[in-house]
Image: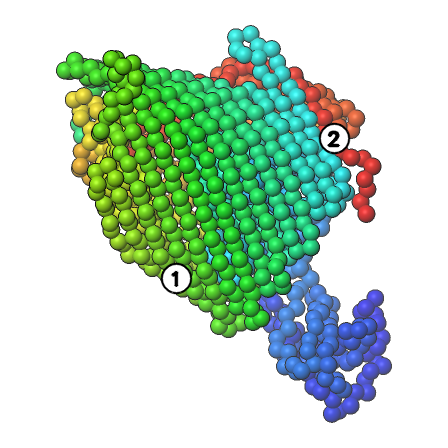
Amino acid sequence: MLKLICIFCLFLFSYHAANAQQYSGTIIDTSLKIPVKNAVVAFLDPKDSTLISFTRTDDKGNFLLKSDVRKNYIIMVMHPVYADFLDNISGENDKLGKIPLIQKSKLLEAVIVKSGSPIRIKGDTTIYTADSFKVSANANVEELLKKLPGIQVDKSGNIKAMGETVQKVLVDGEEFFGDDPGMAVKNLRADAVKEVQVFDKKTDQAEFTGIDDGNTQKTINLKLKDDKKRGHFGKADLAGGLQNKIDDRYNSNLMFSTFKDKRKLSAFFLTGNTGQDGLSWRDNEKYGGNSDDYSMNMDEESGAMYSYRTGSVDDEPYVNTENGFIKNTNSGFQYSNRWKNNSVNFSPKYNSQIYNNNTKQFTQTQIGDSVLNENAGTRSYVNRFNIKNNFIYDGKLDSNNTLKITLKANVYKTQSENDGFTSTTGKSSSLINTSSNNNRTDNDKSVWGANILYKHKFKKQRRTVSLTADWNNLSIDGENYVRSVNTIISTNDVQELNQFTNSNKSTSKFSGKLVYTEPLTKKYSLEISHEILFNGGKNNQVTYSYSPVTGKYDVLIDSLSNDFDQSIILNKPSVKLNYNTKKIKFNVGSGFGLTHFNLEDKTLSKNYIRNFTNFFPAAGFNYSYKANSSFRINYNGSTSQPGINQLQPLRNNNNFFNQYIGNPDLKPSFNNNFNISHNTYNFLKERWMYQSLNINVISNSITNNRIIDKNNGKTITQPINTNGNLSMNFWGGLGLQLKKQKIQMNVNTNFSYSRFADVINSQKSFARTFNTGVGISMRKTVDKKYEWWFDNNFNFSTNKTTQTNQSNNFYNNTTTFDGRIYFKKVWSLQSDFIFNARQKLRAEDNNLNNSLWNARFQRSFKKDEFTVYFLVRDIMNENTGIERAFYSNSYTETRNERLRRYWMAGFTWNFKNKGTNSK
């Protein structure tokens, strides 16, 4: 309608005076970089959009437009081939320069609407309209993600978008239960989601200053429907089954969320003993208590941001819940709210687990012409719980100042016990040593942390100052009992240990960073910063031997007792130059670090004081050569400081034949990291492709020197600094849609190479490891009829050490098939089959092949609101956990006990409020 009005009025306003104000400019095609002729250029009144003046461009795209008075206007450019251009201009600016027009055909690549699959691009964000992708009525978000072009979800629940691994999943721009992204993917209903937004999140600092620091992570934000924000929804899943030869199996999964405007309340409760059902995409985050070292939020205006925060994994050991037997209980609560310019997010969580596992491990170590073969069997028991609290406040103090505060308080209690027997043989299979041991540990741990980010904008655009302060404290009060009998066969020497160790350990980390940015020109800007880092630690460990006379642990062992303090301070000033345009972004800069070590051995009254100077160069280049396509190069130099366990000269003899002692003479290592990556996605052809190459070269690498006695098999390990470590890896992939067959296919490949400088008996050697693999997957879905997914991954590994110059080679192949068939839309049968083929490494071994077959039969009621089901896991009873690894001159094969065949019957209720409609 606006076009008709403008064309009609062209003849009514052709009498403008010859002495009116003149405005000039040029209309340019953005893709072809050529002038646009015969385009209509018009001035409109901002108040009522009435036409003030108009003209047409000449053959060179130039125009000259007259106006009677100087004032603000709306400029409108129209052409049949191009999208209309509208913008506000100032009456004082008569030189309008180049005005870009976008071809309508090009615009379709950014905004696509087609039957069943609407996708659009907004800046760097890809947006999927959720309702356009058909899923079952009670489907979760994970099922929805599997339907979206360019997004892949594997059997373990890992998500990739445009070939890159997704690191975070947000709900309405906020973390959902803190650090557990799987809570949203596994438990939120798909029909509650309005949009799925995929983007590369930036750091708070980069988003605020506009200076790209090269740190981005692939993120998914689930934007909920308005009516789902004013009511409640949830899920209840209860299952159990009686077993014959193993404990009865059970699993429960309860979740509830309620929304009112900007306020959100959510709660969940999970309990079970299957170790597999109802878990999030990262089991270790839910069970192991891990916590990512960055917080995440999404501003409604600026987009997504993340900032590094206190701690990392709180020194919690990782437990793979696929191995062993586990009983777990998890519960959590989340409250978040926004009002005016403030928001809060509070999420306490509780986790408890009881874990049992029997492990068999074979380790072969090559020492010149000699070989040590170690066979070990271990029974492990862990009983632990943790309470984790996370609080985030984000507020605007005024139009130029913002403040963000993140607090955490975590408490851990762990009791564990290991019983094991180990025997070591030589090359001729002659017995060298044996060891039986019992190790009991009782640890109480607390972690406190705070992060404060203050940001200020000056009146001049892109001139900013920001201050970040981060503090983290970890305290451990531990007791450890060791009882072992160790025999050296050649001398018939028997060593019996019965010891008690009490340790009080604490580490404190503080960092503060002040950043100032100054715009130099429209495209160039300067960043100046100064960072201070403090890493302090204290460990007072006292070990006693058991006295048969007193019946107590009261005989002090001096060699196993030590009181040690650590203080490391780093001052790091730096400067960075940044260039930023729509297609090209690059930055280059450097800092230099002054590191001060102050180590105090209080037991020996000895100090270690040292100073180091390092340079921290950095450079990045990003070229977005067309929509949804980018090429990136990054280089960063960084240091790694040794920890207190590596520095304290304290012997650990929990394993008599494998002991560890710290080294206070360690230097910080320096890492040179290079990364080259390329990503492209064509929505019209539904084709995506990615490649990435990463190279690391480490100087002063902290490596272990292992003193190995070939006669008795005893090893003393101490960290030292070495040079020569190198690693590189490449991964790439191609995804496409087979139009006629309606099959989505993905192909990927990878290779990695590492050269590891190892020191054995004070002699330096190199171990080289090469891995390569290729994978292919295909998927097809016909709504309410059938769906299937096929995946095959082949990997080959080879390892060679300079000690023997002999190669160790093996391959493994994993084939997966997953299918589902519907009967009368309410009955369905789902089955998945995995076949693992692993080549043997030694002539006396067998190939390690096994199959895992699962099936589930279900019936849904009341438009899929209710579901009853029956499932069987590991139908062929072949579930075994086998892991292989090369480390330097050692090869290790580990076999874990696993939960094998069992069945369960279950009931699921997916509920939501039905009386709430969208406004």
Q: Earlier in the sequence, mark 2 or mark 1?
A: 1
Q: Which residue is mark 2?
A: 911
Q: Please name the amino acid that badge 1 sits on.
A: Ser
Helix, strand or loop at mark 1:
strand
Of 865 and 663, the residue lying toward us: 663
Above or below for 213 versus 848 = below
The quarter of the picture where residue 226 lies is top right
Residue 589 on image: x %, y %: 39, 63
Helix, strand or loop at mark 2:
strand
Quadrant where the N terminus sits is bottom right
Q: Name the residue located 29 percent from the left edge and 20 percent from the top edge.
A: 553
Of 851 and 305, the residue lying toward us: 305
Residue 854 on image: x %, y %: 57, 20
Residue 209 on image: x %, y %: 52, 62
Residue 91 on image: x %, y %: 70, 81
Task: Give left or right: position of 610 versus 356.
Answer: left
